[in-house]
Amino acid sequence: MNELIIRLSAGEQAECADLADATGRTPEELVLDAVRALLRTERDRVGAEASRLARRHAPLLKRLGE
């Protein structure tokens, strides 16, 4: 597994530790869950936009492929 180092302010680190404690997770688990959720959201958003653009420009894309 790869490692990523992020810098948090003291306040952010304290909030992360408090939330992790309140939810029964480690701060690392909490942050990993947040990153995964963001990646899912952005992947879905970008995929939807790509589909929209492909539909909008389908005639042009078809001509370019000929």
Image (cartoon, rainbow, N blue to C red):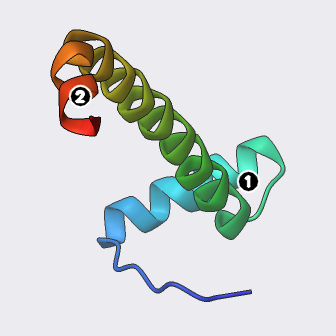
User: Which image quarter is the C terminus in?
Assistant: top left
Badge 1 is on which residue?
21
Which image quadrant is residue 51 in? top left
SS at mark 1? Answer: helix
User: Which residue is at the front of the view, 26 or 61?
Assistant: 61
Inspect the image, locate mark 1, and give the three-letter code of the amino acid beneath it: Asp
> Residue 42 at what x, y percent from top left?
42, 38
Is 6 left, or right, of 53 in this rendering?
right
Which image quadrant is residue 23 in? top right
Q: Circle 2: is it few (<14), some (14-19), or many (20+) Cα within 10 Å?
A: few
> Residue 10 at what x, y percent from top left?
34, 72
> Residue 2 at what x, y percent from top left?
65, 88
Give the number of callouts: 2
User: Which residue is at the front of the view, 24 or 33?
Assistant: 33
User: Vertically, is 2 above or below 15?
Assistant: below
> Residue 26 at what x, y percent from top left?
75, 64
Q: Residue at x 48, y 43 (%)?
A: 38
Is 15 left, or right, of 9 in this rendering?
right
User: Which residue is at the front of the view, 25 or 57?
Assistant: 57
Disc number lying in front (2 or 1): 2
SS at mark 2? Answer: helix
User: Which disc is residue 60 wearing?
Assistant: none
Mark sitting earlier along the chain (2/1)? 1
Is 18 left, or right, of 49 in this rendering?
right
Q: Residue at x 21, y 11 (%)?
A: 56
User: Vertically, is 47 above or below 5?
Assistant: above
Inspect the image, locate mark 2, and give the three-letter code of the amino acid beneath it: Leu
User: Which disc is residue 61 wearing?
Assistant: 2
